[in-house]
Image (cartoon, rainbow, N blue to C red):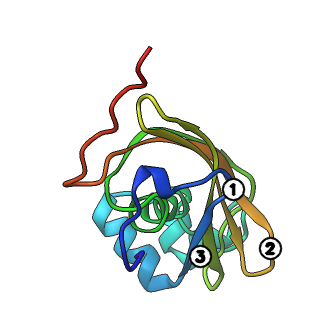
Amino acid sequence: MNPTPLTYGEINIGDAAALSLAATAETVALYARLTGDLNPVHLDEDYAARSFFKKRVAHGLLAAGLISAVLGTRLPGPGAVYLRQELDFKAPVFLGETITARAQVLEKFDRHEKIRLRTWVDNQDGRLVLDGSALVLFRPSGLKAASPPRA
């Protein structure tokens, strides 16, 4: 998490942040129990061996959830409220891989304190596994919303 939470005005086009996670069997099992997504391609070695992937894969939304963690804790940080997320799944995340979710500020909408970011996840080899964009409202707790520009 940022040591000192950012304000809307401190965020600039091009700012970026990242967060990594190891896709372990334990992480996948915890995610499966939490969400109820018990698809055997994520949990059963024998089933997964006969699947399209030939081995176990992490849930796609586990990677997407890591994007949410970047937005809520790093950039823009506490006070970010998701309005939209587009996701394009590019490649599977196999158990044993380390994935890194990244976000970069593309555009700011000052009147409503909204921020559009490119969001993506890659693995330890730099392979893109998820690509997308997000729109967030950013009004950190305890900070007054900016006044609209005067005409």
Hey, which residue is sitting farthest front in the picture?
151
In the figure, residue 104 lies in which quadrant?
bottom right
Measuring from the top left, give residue 33's x and y in whole percent: 31, 68
* The N terminus: image quadrant: bottom left
Which three-letter amino acid code belongs to the residue tagged 1? Gly
**Which residue is at the front of the view, 143 or 37?**
143
Which three-letter amino acid code belongs to the residue tagged 3? Asp
**Which residue is at the front of the view, 146 or 6?**
146
Measuring from the top left, give residue 34's x and y in whole percent: 29, 65
Q: Nearer the viewer, mark 1 or mark 2?
A: 1
SS for dot 2: loop
Label 1 and label 2: CA atoms lie apart by: 20 Å
SS for dot 1: loop
Q: Nearer the viewer, mark 2 or mark 3?
A: 2
Would you name the residue on which mark 1 appears?
Answer: 14
Q: Residue at x 69, y 56 (%)?
A: 14
Query: Mark 3 or mark 2, which is nearer the start of the sequence?
Result: 3
Given contact means CB atoms under 8 Å apart, are the residues at marks 1 and 2 in contact?
no
Would you name the residue on which mark 2 appears?
Answer: 126
Q: Residue at x 72, y 64 (%)?
A: 53
Query: Mark 2 or mark 1, which is nearer the start of the sequence?
Result: 1
**Which residue is at the front of the view, 21 or 9?**
9
In the figure, residue 18 lies in which quadrant?
bottom right
